[in-house]
Amino acid sequence: MKGKAQTFTIKMMVLLGVLAGCFFLSFMVGRYPISPGTVWDIIRSQVMYVKPYWEETLMTVVLQVRLPRIIMGILVGGSLSI
């Protein structure tokens, strides 16, 4: 039984890693391609102080357009898989 539990854990970790990778890569697609590092910094700037080096437009695109769509896509995909 221990082998099956360990295999399941490894599969879940890989799938979560793929999901996280797709999450950050999806920000690079569109009219304003944004690097994953910039996305990470913009999201972090909402929680802690990060000196802004990006344009205000990029922050608006990430926080008000792409982030809600990506989160909604993840939630819808997860609910359809049940």
Image (cartoon, rainbow, N blue to C red):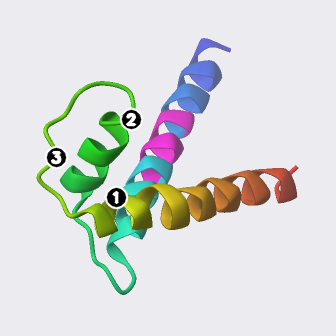
Considering only vertical position in the picture, is 32 above or below 18? Answer: below
Residue 14 belongs to the span the image colors magenta:
yes
Residue visible at 36% across and 87% down in the picture: 31
Q: Main secondary structure of the magenta part?
A: helix
Checking the image for residue 59, the label placed there is: 1
Give the magenta-colored segment's residue range: 12-18
Measure the alpha-carbon separation of dots 1 and 3.
9 Å
Q: Looking at the image, which residue is at 11% across and 52% down?
A: 53
- Give the structural element (helix, strand or loop) at label 2: loop
User: In terms of image quadrants, where is residue 9?
Assistant: top right
Q: Are marks 2 and 3 in contact (CB under 8 Å)?
A: no
For the residue pair 2 and 52, the one nearer the viewer reads as 52
Percent x, y of residue 76: 78, 58
Name the N-terminal-most of marks 1 and 3. Answer: 3
Q: What numbered label is drawn on residue 46?
A: 2
Q: Position of residue 32 (x, y in %)?
A: 31, 79
Q: Is residue 13 magenta?
A: yes
Check contact, mark 1 vs mark 3: CB within 8 A.
yes
What amino acid does circle 1 point to?
A: Met
Residue extending farthest to the top is 2
Q: Amino acid at mark 3?
A: Pro
Front residue of 37/64: it is 64
User: What is the total number of numbered labels drawn onto the structure image?
Assistant: 3
Residue at label 3?
52
Q: Measured from the top left, where is residue 68 in percent x and y?
A: 60, 57
Distance from Cα at disc 2 to Cα at disc 3:
11 Å
Q: Circle 3: is it few (<14), some (14-19), or many (20+) Cα within 10 Å?
A: few
Q: Are marks 2 and 1 in contact (CB under 8 Å)?
A: no
> Label 2 to label 1, Cα distance in Å?
10 Å
Mark 2 residue type: Gln
At numbered mark 3, what does the secondary structure look like: helix, strand or loop? loop
Residue in the picture at 36% in, 65% down:
25
